[in-house]
Amino acid sequence: MIPRRRRRLVAGAIVAAVGLFLTAVYWLFDPSRFIFPRCPVYVITGWQCPGCGSQRALHALLHGDVAAAWHYNAFLLCMAPVVALLLFSEFFRDRYPRLNRALTGQAAVICLIVVIVLWTIGRNIFL
């Protein structure tokens, strides 16, 4: 049986490798010029989901164009620190259990859902 710590390190290495590969793909290929998956919510309803524009925003960020990334999906830029904190708390949950419980608890999840819903409504009505 593989120790828990080693499984975590292997899982982290796999996630990092996949992340590096996807980063290279998005750096090399512009999603607006090449065939990338289209958002099924937008294709079916015409409404932009919270993630719409994320591929183009990521490409712009990787090329240092923060203004274009903000234009494509401001939510991605605002949520990047939150996602980084969630990943940190998950990876070090044994060392910082209170932080992990606070970030993954019911109140945090409800808050995140409310923010996502408000962003979705706001971007489709006001933008």
Image (tube, rainbow, N blue to C red):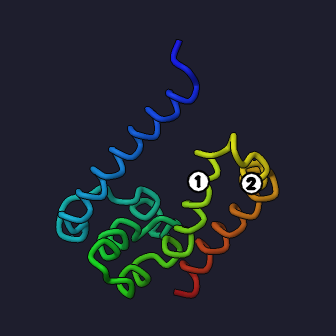
**Among numbered discs 2 and 1, the one appearing first in the sequence:** 1
Residue 79 lies left or right of residue 24; in this view the side is right
Q: Position of residue 57 (x, y in %)?
A: 37, 73
Residue 117 figure quarter: bottom right
* Label placed on residue 99: 2
- SS at badge 1: helix
- SS at badge 2: helix
Residue 112 lies left or right of residue 77; in this view the side is right
Residue at image mark 1: 88
Distance from disc 2 to disc 1, alpha carbons, whole Å, reads: 10 Å
Q: Residue furthest top?
A: 1
Question: Is residue 122 placed above or below 89 in the rendered structure?
Answer: below
Q: Amino acid at mark 1?
A: Phe
Residue shown at 64%/51% (left/top)? Answer: 89
Residue shown at 76%/59% (left/top)? Answer: 108
Question: Is residue 21 placed above or below 78 in the rendered structure?
Answer: above
Looking at the image, how many numbered discs can be counted on the residues? 2
Q: Position of residue 14 (x, y in %)?
A: 38, 38
Q: Position of residue 119 (x, y in %)?
A: 61, 74
Q: Amino acid at mark 2?
A: Leu
Question: Is residue 36 placed above or below 8 in the rendered structure?
Answer: below
Is there a contact, CB below 8 Å, between mark 2 and mark 1? no
Foreground residue, 36 or 90? 90
Residue 83 figure quarter: bottom right
Residue 50 lies left or right of residue 98; in this view the side is left
How crowded pointer 1 is (Cα within 10 Å; few <14, some 14-19, many 20+) is rated as some
